[in-house]
Image (tube, rainbow, N blue to C red):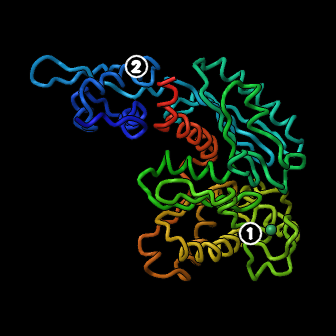
Amino acid sequence: MLSEPTGSVTGAGALLSILRDGQARTRAELVQLTGLARSTVSQRLDALLTHQWIVPATDAISSGGRPATAFAFNQGARVVAAADLGATHARVAVTDLASNVLVERTADLPIDRGPEMTLGWLVDTLKELLVETGGQLCGVGVGLPGPVEHISGRPVNPPIMPGWDGFPVPEWLGSRLGAPVLVDNDVNIMALGEHWAARPEVEHLVFVKIGTGIGCGIISERRLHRGAQGAAGDIGHIRVTSAAEVICRCGNAGCLEAVAGGASIASQLRNAGIHAENSRDVVGLVRAGNTQAVQFIRQAGREIGDVLASIVNFFNPSVIVIGGDIAEAGEHVLAGVREVIYSRSLPLATQHLSIRATELGDRAGVIGAAVMVIEAVLAPEAVDLVVNS
Ligand SMILES: [Zn+2]
């Protein structure tokens, strides 16, 4: 006789994955879906109930005779802490296991004050928020505005984060918050958040962040593509001809970011005698109808579109999402981006390509940071480990 398969393919974690779509299911339905024996399904449901990952659903389904109990994913089983730390401001939230924000806070927080000041503030703020929500913390997700080595969660030579190079962010935060910590760069978590919350049906998506700098997060076959070291998507430092003479903050000449990032547009405006300190000022001017600002931002859109046209030919995404501070200038950026992509990319690649603004806006980062944690905690293997321990 064949023995029952065990492990992650058909373990308790796999059952939980099925229930995560939000639909309540009866034992009989789960037996049918998994091909497992009824007794095995019952055993695994009991384990999931013990850990509160699932709850008996209130709307019991009748199957002819007496009503059968259905089970549903318990998205309130744990809470997740999420932080999106930018160059100058921070957004922190506590969410449930479906990435719904339960409570959040924003603050002006310059990242260049160094890791201990910044992360110290984060620990204090998260502790306050966790008192407000209650619930068991299952993990902490953090986005940083610089390159992060994925395996260690440590920043690597981040250009705008003095003092952070190699800093052990996961260990430092983990020992103070008592939960596992995952760290990634801000653009990757924005891509995750936008994909999960706004366009989960899309297989191939590129999220472009246009803020002070420029970067992109890549969703390939519905998963975040980080590359070998976690550096994938760093399009801000791709060389463009119009920037040939311009020195970038990375030290090289000719980077896209040096002609099309928010900092660059602000400096172009200052050269034209218009006051603008940063990307927020640029957006303010565009919204106020300043024609020079509109022109510069449209041109920045074209420069970015030029690089994205190559990305489209190379990667063939079906959706490009534009986010970040500068994206708040709305249609003017999108118009420049679209103009160049549609004229420069191959027809087959652009036939069904949609280029649009972020739906989550400045919440994409915290939602993505939460998603990163949720995916790790609820991965079938991780659930099996907890349930079998
Ligand atoms: Zn550069």
Q: Eyeballing the image, is 7 above or below 60?
A: below
Which amino acid does the dot numbered 1 rest on?
Ala
Residue 6, located in which quarter of the rendered image?
A: top left
Q: Is residue 285 placed above or below 256 in the rendered structure?
A: above
Residue 312 horizontal/vertical position (percent)? 54, 73
Residue at position x 16%, y 23% from top? Answer: 62
Reading the image, the residue beneath label 1 is: 260
Which is nearer the eye, 43 or 88?
43
Disc on the earlier residue, 2 or 1: 2
Which residue is at 61% across, 28% downward? 103
Q: Mark 2 Cα within 10 Å, few/some/many (few <14, many 20+)? A: some
Q: Please, which residue is most extreme toward the front here?
A: 1
Direction from residue 151 to residue 364 in the image, left or right: left
Q: Quadrant of residue 106?
A: top right
What numbered label is drawn on residue 270? none
Going by the numbered disc 2, the residue's amino acid type is Leu
Element class at badge 2? helix
Residue 122: horizontal and vertical position, in percent? 77, 32
**In front of the other: 10 or 125:** 10
Q: Disc 1 on helix, strand or loop?
A: helix
Between the residue at mark 2 and the residue at mark 1, the CA separation in whole angstroms equals 52 Å
Whether pointer 2 and pointer 1 mark residues with C-beta atoms closer than 8 Å, the reply is no
Using the rendered image of the protein, determine whether residue 20 is visible from the camera's viewpoint: no
Q: Can the viewer see residue 167 in this picture?
A: yes
Q: Is mark 2 within 8 Å of ligand 1?
A: no
Q: Check the picture and name the quadrant holding the N terminus.
A: top left
Task: Find disc 2 in the rendering and name its residue.
Answer: 49
